[in-house]
Image (cartoon, rainbow, N blue to C red):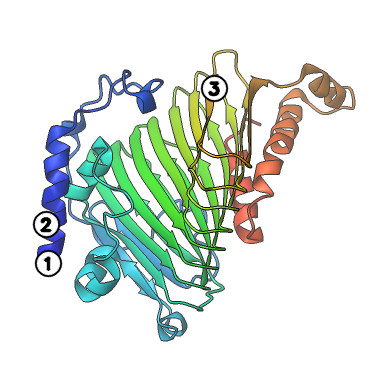
Amino acid sequence: MSPWLAERRDLAAQSNALLPVPTLTDEHWRFTSLRGIDFDAFQPVAAPAPGEIAGAILADGDHAGRVVVRDGGAVVDELSEAVTAQGVAFGSIRRLAEERPELVEPLLGTIVGYDEKFAAENGALWTDGVLLHVPAGVRVAEPFHVAYEIATEGAAQQWRALIVVEEGAEATIVEEHLTGLPGYANGVAEVVVGAAGHLTYVVVQDRGDAALHFAAHRAEIAKDGLLDWVACSTGARTGKTRMETRLTGEGATGRLSGVYVVDDKRHLDLDTTQEHDAPNAVSDLAFKGVLLDEARSVWRGVIRVAAGAQGTDSYQENRNLLLSPKARADSIPGLEIDTNDVRCTHGATAGPVDPMLRFYLMSRGVPEAEANRVIVEGFLEEALERIPDERIRTALTEHVMRRIPS
């Protein structure tokens, strides 16, 4: 292991040892209890034998490159020759941290620090993940695909991602989290979009109903850069994902689109931050969720505008459709504004299917279950239509609708 990497792991380990597991008294964990979870019961394991991943939602079609991280390591690590010739680096971050340290050392651990328990644990223990580095001016048409899979019962998977799109570059990366087995996944993704760069970042969390999923994603967007961020959550028994967007350059844009379907007794916690540090930047967040059975969702969203960030235009909304009287959705929007001449708005709703709309459909011969599906698809359509790639949009629409009872 390189000395610089060992030093950062040591710093993270020191923080991890000092930080307690969050409780309901912590502001970001007020609605998500970790009581009763024995994290020590999950242990890291080496990567199993190579092979294709089962159940991937967005793996079909052409890709610029593919990585599959199974348990503790990459078992698929591929990049097309054409994209390699453009100077793009993509593959196992464990491998590239040794082969191309100049791409990893300057940024790893600088965007997501070690001041939060799960991020500190990851900084000390991560085993593999992905690096994507697109040089200035390079545009890659086909998406990059990475899948994280727990293939061993009781495994702890600590994954790490570093995604960099330099000035004027353009790329799409699809990240899927999959497992049908009991396991614990904890990950960190650090994202940099350079000046006038454009990144589409799609994250699908479809862990099994016995899995735990925790992740921190943080992005920094430079002048006139654009991040199109798509989040789809349909899995895990207990899951908490932090999505933080920091607009550091004038004219930067961050667009966050999210859909989730939560059933059974699953608990999903989404914690978002839109942080405006530069003037005339735009952030736009729209999350829509459908809850069934005794499921629960939590969304906590903060728009933070720094002094000097005049001309900020920021919006956030969270809408929830409750298909069961026992389902629950908590939405906590917030604004922290330290300057004037800004436009910041938010909205949040939660409620059952409109009975008049259901009656209208049923009066025209549509069975009740199918009427509910039509209403749900219409409800989610607005968020799904924000996904820029048609192939990804179609696949995610089909995936979330399979979660709705027919």
Check disc 3 and give the amino acid type.
Ala
Question: How far across and down, in percent of the image, does residue 302 sit?
Answer: 50, 34
Residue 2 image label: 1
The answer to whether 163 is drawn above or below residue 206 in the figure is below
Residue type (three-letter) at the residue carrying disc 1: Ser
Which residue carries the number 3 mark?
329
Which mark is nearer the camera, 1 or 2?
Answer: 2
Q: Is residue 282 left or right of residue 7?
A: right
In the image, residue 167 lies at what x, y percent?
Answer: 48, 72
Residue at (65% x, 43% y) in the render? 383
The residue carrying mark 2 is: 7
User: How far across and down, in percent of the image, does residue 160 sit?
Assistant: 30, 54
Q: Nearer the viewer, residue 103 or 161?
A: 103
Query: Tag 2 or tag 1, which sits nearer the N-term?
Result: 1
Q: CA distance from mark 3 to mark 1?
A: 46 Å
Q: Position of residue 305 (x, y in %)?
A: 51, 41
| Foreground pick, 330 / 12 | 12
